[in-house]
Amino acid sequence: MSIGITNSAVRTDTTVFASLLVNSHLIALALADQRGLLFTNRAFDNLFGRTGPATGSVLDLLVLADRDAVDAALRSDSALPWICVAEALRGDGETFEVELRFERLMAGGEALLAIFAQDITDRFRETARLNLLAYSDPLTGLGNRAMFADRLRVAVLSARRTAGLFAVVSLDLDGFKEVNDRHGHDVGDMVLQRIAARFLAGLRDTDTVARPGGDEFAVLLTVLSARGDAMLAADRLVELARLPIDLGKYEVTVGASAGIAIYPEHAGTVDHLLAAADRALYVAKRHGRGCSVWAEPACPGDAIPAPLVWDVAYEVGVAEIDEQHARLVALLNDLVAALRNGEQHDAALREVIRYTGFHFACEERLMRSVKYSGVAAHANMHRRLLGDLHGLRLDGTGLSVSLVARYLQEWLIRHVDGADRDVAAALHAAGAG
C-alpha cells in the first residue's frame, strides 16, 4: 500500500504550523530577543521543568560554568547558526546534558533568536563511558598507554609554544614477579592497585600517572620550575613503592626503578621522550634497582625499537609454544623492519594480531587438555591482551606506530617470561610437554 500526498492536501496556513510548534512534544523550541526569552513551547517547558510564561535569559537555563562560552557566541552574529553541548538546569535544580542549536530569524522586521534544545544525557553518558574504556586501565583506574600518549602529545605542543619544561618518568616495579609467583595473580593485582593509589596521591593535580601495562607505570610531570624537580618527584615515587603493602593475610614489599627524560633537553617528540625515559629505566634496573636515572639525549632513530633477538633463555620447554613464540618474535621484527625502512606497516601489524589470536587459542587448548587450574585467569589475560591489540590506532589519532611496536615487544617478553612459564610447568607435570 502506498500513501500519496498532493500539494492541495498540504495546508500552508501559518496558524497550523504555529499550533504544531506550540504544542509539540518532540521539538523543544524557544524564541528570544536581546532582552530575553519571548516564547517557549510545551516541549521546551517540559525539558527544562518550566512553568508560567517565558521570562529571563537563555543563559539562566545553564550552569554557571557554561554561560560565558554560550554568551560569547550569541554576541557574535558570525557564529550563528551554532550548535553546542552544555550542562543545563531544570526547575528542580537537577542538571542534565543538552544540545542547543541557535539560529537567527526575522519576524516582522525584528531579528529574533530561535533556540532548539535536545536532551542528550544518555548519549553523553554513553560517550563518556566509551571514552573511559578507551583511555583507562580497568585494574587500577589510571590512564592507559593511549591516554598517556595523548596527554604527552598535548604537553609537547604546549611546551613548544611557551618554551616550557616538563618531564616523563618511566617506572617499573622491582620484585613484582616474585610476588606474583609466590602469592598468585590476585595478590599481584592488589599490589598494582595499591601502588597506583600511592603514585596518584604522591603527585600534583597537574601531573598524570598511567599504567601502560604489566607492572609498568608512566608519569608526566608538567609545569616544572627547575630540572631537579623531576628527580625529586621520581625519587619520591620510588620511596612510595618501597613501603610495605598490608593485604590482610599478607604483607608484601616491592620496589621501583625510574628513568627520567626532560623536554627539550633529552628529546622533543612523544616517541623520543618515551624512548629516552625507557632507556634510562633499563639503566636503573642494571644499576641495582630502586633508583632514578637521568636519560641521555635521544638520537634520530631511537624512537623505533631495535629488533628482538630470540634466545633460548626465552624458551619455556614446550615445543609447540616455543615455536609459536619464536614466530611471534619474527613477525614483530617484520613490523619493526617496515618502520625502519619507511614501508607500509598495516599488513605486518594485522599479521601480528592474527597470529597472536591463533597462538592464544593453541595455549588455551593445551591448558584445557591437562585441566590446568589457572586456565580461566590465563585466558582472561589473553582476552585483555587481544583487546589492547585491537584497540591500537595507527591513523594519527592514537598511538604512533613506533610506540605500538615497542608495546608489542614489551608485552610479548613479559608474557613469555611470566605466566607462560607457569603453563609450561603444568604441561610438563602432566607429561604433555
Image (cartoon, rainbow, N blue to C red):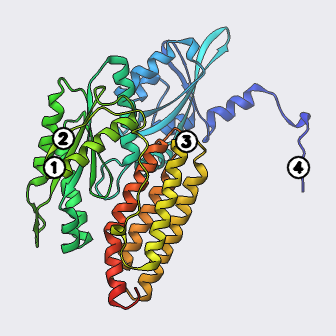
- Residue type at mark 3: give it: Asn
Q: Is residue 56 visible?
A: no
Residue under pointer 3: 341
Q: The C terminus appears in which quarter of the rendering?
A: bottom left
What residue lies at 74% left-to-right and 31% top-to-bottom? 16
Residue under pointer 4: 3
Disc 3, SS: loop
Q: The N terminus appears in which quarter of the rendering?
A: bottom right
In the rendered structure, find residue 211 and report the number of the disc placed on it: none
Q: Nearer the viewer, residue 1 or 156?
A: 156
Nearest to viewer (mark 2 / mark 1): 1
Q: Is residue 86 left or right of residue 374?
A: right
The reply to whether callout 2 and callout 1 are in contact (CB within 8 Å) is yes
Q: Position of residue 193 (x, y in %)?
A: 23, 58
Q: Is residue 74 left or right of residue 277?
A: right
Residue under pointer 2: 293
Per the model, the C-alpha gap separating discs 2 and 1 is 9 Å
> Of the residues under marks 1 and 4, which one precedes in the sequence?
4
Q: Position of residue 380 (x, y in %)?
A: 40, 70
